[in-house]
Amino acid sequence: MAVDARELAKGAAAQFTEERYKGPTTLREGTTPVATGATAILPNDPERLMWLMVNPAVNPGSLGFSREVTLAAGIPMAANGGIVSANVIEDAELIARAVYGIQDVAGATWYHVEVLRVTALEGEET
């Protein structure tokens, strides 16, 4: 579910973010069923500034930046609320890459939230 930045009051966080990233931002959150085979979770998005991923399942998983992710060759996602996050300040262009996940033993539904810079088409206002 996307939250339009224009619907939010311009609080301190919104003002800071807009100044730092040269434009307004919006939140996009959702859930993705992650299987025991590599599963696409987030698409490539060059306007992404941050993402946060949560594994609420009782089994661990892994995430990575290609369909080659495995439990042994990926970033561990702990069970019962394991969290991994990335942001453009610390992780540079990696943040824009697609994200894939894989779950151990049984599939699970992972929660994710992203912060995206809002860009306008030529002639439009943000």
Image (cartoon, rainbow, N blue to C red):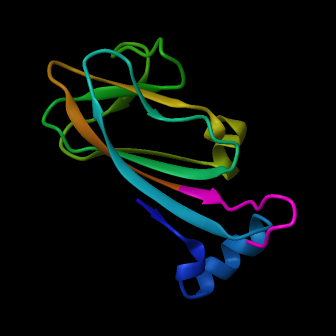
Determine whether, in the image, residue 96 is placed left or right of residue 105: right
Please count the marks in the image.
Answer: 0
Quarter of the N terminus within the rendering: bottom left
Residue 73 is situated, as x and y percent measured from the top left of the image, at 43, 14
Out of 83 and 116, give the one closest to the viewer. 116
Residue occupying the point 43% across, 21% down: 74
Residue occupying the point 38% across, 14% down: 70
110 relative to 73, above or below: below
76 relative to 21, above or below: above
Quarter of the C terminus within the rendering: bottom right
Out of 75 and 32, give the one closest to the viewer. 32
Determine whether, in the image, residue 47 is placed left or right of residue 87: right
Determine whether, in the image, residue 32 is placed left or right of residue 15: left
Residue occupying the point 69% across, 52% down: 89
Residue 42 is situated, as x and y percent measured from the top left of the image, at 48, 37
Q: Main secondary structure of the magenta part?
A: loop
Residue 22 is situated, as x and y percent measured from the top left of the image, at 80, 67
Out of 106 and 120, give the one closest to the viewer. 120
Q: Name which quarter of the figure residue 65 lies in.
A: top right
Determine whether, in the image, residue 111 is placed left or right of residue 13: left
70 relative to 17, above or below: above
In the image, the segment drawn in magenta is 115-126
Q: Name which quarter of the figure residue 120 lies in.
A: bottom right
> Is 116 within the magenta?
yes
Q: Name which quarter of the figure residue 119 lies in.
A: bottom right
Q: What is the residue that sits farthest to the right in this orientation?
A: 123
Q: What is the residue that sits farthest to the front in this orientation?
A: 123
Residue 123 is situated, as x and y percent measured from the top left of the image, at 87, 66
83 relative to 41, above or below: below
> Is 106 within the magenta?
no
